Image: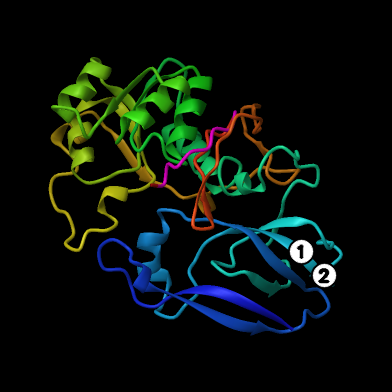
Amino acid sequence: MVVSKAWTLRQHFQGFPKASDFHLREETLPQPKNGQVLLEAVFLSVDPYMRPYSQTMMKEGDVMIGSQVAKVIQSYNPSFPVGCHVVSDCGWRSHWVCDGAELTPVLPDWPQDIPLSLALGAIGMPGLTALYGLEEVCEIKKGETLLVNAAAGAVGSVVGQIAKIKGCRVVGCAGTDTKVSYLKELGFDQVFNYKTATSLEESLREAAPHGYDCYFENVGGKFSSVVMPQMREYGRIAVCGSISMYNDTTPQTGILSTPQTVILQHTVQHHTTDRYTVHTTDGYTVHTTDGYTVHTTDGYTVHTTDGYTVHTTDGYTVHTTDGYT
């Protein structure tokens, strides 16, 4: 028998999550049966979506939702031999027994100099979120101008670099000068710190005087209200998240669209990765419909806090920072 440690939701979050909202418990797992495997966690994901999703997907006392990279340490399933690594959605727990139905194998020839944690980043859910938002929702085209907020985050930094590869002009914003410098290193055309900007409206207009064709929305709230009037005709908005609102105790209200949205026939669409089919033949290499392949290579930095590793990656060349902070 294996004793697993699991972080559970002691109580639903009110405002910013607190340590007292969580409880660490132990649970004894059964011996794996025929067709099952025993997993041992290597990396756990800590993602912004967990904050709002926990309100609707979890009861108090449930194990915290989330993905993990895990190692198979005992197996009665030939598809997952001992020693292989997988991505699992079994939440914040150290060990788990399952039948393998929901497991995704990590590439068996994963490069030794690249952390396995990147299967939770650029070549995992955040990278796919960026890819599908740009290609399926925005249908981005060469020569267009894209705006992405929370641009130094796990999704935003991927968005900007894919858009550059596609031949677009990319404007990004972030909340610290360090992140602004990072985005410039990644090749963003225009970047500004929204916290120190005198006027968000003027900063956006200065960065793209002729407006924006596409807007990748990660922040929500008042930011969106400022962006909407600057969208061009037939502009497309991919709504990925609204991180500025996740910890609100009182829901924000206000005008998030404008008459221009109707007149200029903007398209606004929310998206998550489970809506789209992942075209894969070799684990987490992503083959897209237009023929280019997402690969991660070198050039990353890892930020670790209290045993949890937080990753922000760019999706092509891997740059890892603390974009979830």
- At x 49% / y 26%, what residue is drawn? 161
Which residues, given as a range, are shown in magenta? 317-324
Asked which secondary structure carries label 2, the reply is strand
The foreground one among 237 and 32 is 32
Q: Main secondary structure of the magenta part?
A: loop
Kindly tell me whether residue 193 is visible in this rendering: yes
Q: Where does the image place residue 218, in percent across and percent down from the top left?
A: 35, 42
Is 87 in the magenta?
Answer: no
Kindly tell me whether residue 147 is visible in this rendering: no
Instruction: Look at the picture and state if 69 lies above or below 185.
Output: below
- At x 36% / y 48%, what residue is drawn? 241
Instruction: Look at the picture and state if 235 lies above or below 85.
Output: above
Side of 22 where 109 appears, left or right: right
Applied colour scheme? rainbow
Q: For the residue marked with disc 1, what is the amino acid?
A: Val
Q: Quadrant of residue 151?
A: top left
Asked which secondary structure carries label 1, the reply is strand
Q: Where does the image place residue 293, in percent across and percent down from the top left?
A: 66, 30
Side of 237 where 280 appears, left or right: right
- At x 41% / y 26%, what residue is drawn? 183
Q: Where does the image place residue 82, in percent across and percent down from the top left?
A: 83, 63
Q: Quadrant of residue 113?
A: top right
Is 322 in the magenta?
Answer: yes
Q: Quadrant of residue 220?
A: top left
Residue wearing tag 1: 72
Residue wearing tag 2: 75
Q: Where does the image place residue 160, in percent across and percent down from the top left?
A: 45, 28
Residues under numbered marks 1 and 2 in contact, where contact means CB atoms less than 8 Å apart: yes
- At x 75% / y 46%, what residue is drawn? 107
Side of 264 where 134 appears, left or right: right
Q: For the residue marked with disc 2, what is the amino acid?
A: Ser
Dot 2: few (<14), some (14–19), or many (≥20) neighbours within 10 Å? many
